[in-house]
Image (cartoon, rainbow, N blue to C red):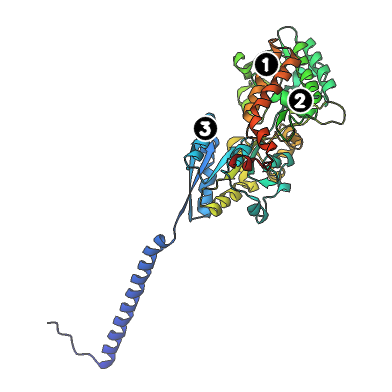
Amino acid sequence: MIFLPELPSTGYRKIGSLCRFLSLGLSVIVLYLALGCGSSESLPTTKLRFWVMGREGELVEELVAIFEKENPGIEVEVQQIPWSAAHEKLLTAYVGRSTPDLAQLGNTWIAEFAALGALEELDSQIATTPGIAPQDYFEGIWRTNVIDGVTWGVPWYVDTRLIFYRKDVLAQAGFDSMPGDWAGWIKAMEAVNRSVGPDRYPIFLPLNEWTQPVIFGLQEGSPLLVDDFTRGAFSAPRFRDAFHFYYDIFERGLAPPVGNNEIANLYQEFAKGLFAMYITGPWNLVEFQRRLPEELLDAWGTAPLPGPGPGRPGVSLAGGSSLVLFKRSGHGDASWRLVEFLSRAENQLRFYELTGDLPAKLDAWTDGGLAEGQRTRAFWVQLHRVVPLPAVPEWELIAARVQEYSEEAIRGVTARDSALTELDREVDRILQKRRWLRKRRVPSSPHVLQER
């Protein structure tokens, strides 16, 4: 038993008040801790699976970490997929009902995955999201994501093809800038040919690439495919005339009839002067800067492609990658929040600094000074002159056939006009199922085609 000394009644009241105060405080602390411990369980975390191709899958992690801090209820798992395996992996995931929540998709693949019914339509999200609208992007790039009036993706980064060239070699041949049309371009190449001497060439056009003949065809206004994308138009006058121009570059001895695999080191040969011009894309901005010797760092530049004639600007391919949402996700709102985050100008510029991938948003170009950059300026101009490829799921197969028949013609295996006739026959075979569906009046939307 404990004996307390006698105290005045006021003393006992003070002790009683203190005890009640301590008891109340302890109760509040216990309640606070209880609520605190339970709060992490009452706020569920959304886990997103984000598939990204190539080196971008590693470098985007920096931006994803910032996104997660802004959105504490969302965790993003980035899966890096090699480009060489990406297409097959995406198709396998679709068949196995294990597609990610969102992914990077090359814009030539948009039509195929829309046709499968794998992608979420994005028009409603775009309509309510400031900063993501067609006018915020290069027109031709945006169009690669729209099929039959439905938007399936948002451009993430862009690429196109234009000319990388030796300014010093061109100047030595008497030209202070790249000509703006085909006739002037041929004159410049002939002048370079005379200037550099034997065993050197004005331009390198790799035979194992389909892009060059297709670009020239687009410049002449060829649709590439006709009859609602059910037949080839490669032997038609517009593409045929463009192919003759392409063929004649080799016929005149202005380009070596070889592929990339027959050039030991492209950058070394460019530095040594084996060729003075090369049609390529923005990924080579970093590579040329890094791989060319120091004495040539100011001797090369970029230029938009010449067009077929005066007043006819040289168009190029609308390329790049887009961000898409998959229908089976179940986390559409959270996925769209990540798309919006990656589409902000400041994040597009940071991604450019990390990867060298050119931003898709126009304000990123102007805010970051890329529109006036020494070598990016040409891409700014060219990206306003790009044309989407036919939005059909079969395009990858068709492009491979373009490369094969073009190479056969250049190497003399097949006569050039016969090669185009054979190419159309092969493309018509590839598109046979599409024609069959059209005859039965199946709606023209590619995603409807596949679902039926």
Q: Amino acid at mark 1?
A: Glu
Q: Which picture quadrant has residue 266?
A: top right
Earlier in the chain: of badge 2 and badge 3, it is: 3
Q: Is residue 191 left or right of residue 256?
A: right
Q: Which picture quadrant has residue 180?
A: top right
Alpha carbon separation for disc pair 2 and 3: 30 Å
Earlier in the chain: of badge 1 and badge 2, it is: 2
Q: Amino acid at mark 2?
A: Phe
Pick the residue in front: 35 or 403.
403
Give residue 330's position: percent from left, percent from top: 51, 52
Give residue 200's position: percent from left, percent from top: 71, 10
Residue depicted at 38% across the width and 64% down the height: 38
Q: Which mark is residue 262?
A: none
Q: Is residue 202 left or right of residue 358?
A: right
Alpha carbon separation for disc pair 1 and 2: 15 Å
Q: Is residue 128 above or below residue 141?
A: below
Is residue 206 something that shows in the picture? no
* Residue at far front of view: 440
* Screen quadrant of the N terminus: bottom left
Could you tell me how many numbered marks the image carries? 3
Is residue 399 something that shows in the picture? yes
> Which residue lies under the disc numbered 2?
216
Mark 3 crowd level (few <14, some 14–19, many ≥20, 10 Å Cα): few
> Which residue lies under the disc numbered 3?
88
Where disc 2 sits, the SS reads helix
Where disc 3 sits, the SS reads helix
Mark 2 crowd level (few <14, some 14–19, many ≥20, 10 Å Cα): many
Alpha carbon separation for disc pair 1 and 3: 26 Å
> Which residue lies under the disc numbered 1?
407
Q: Amino acid at mark 3?
A: Glu
Earlier in the chain: of badge 1 and badge 3, it is: 3
Pick the residue in front: 405 or 354.
405
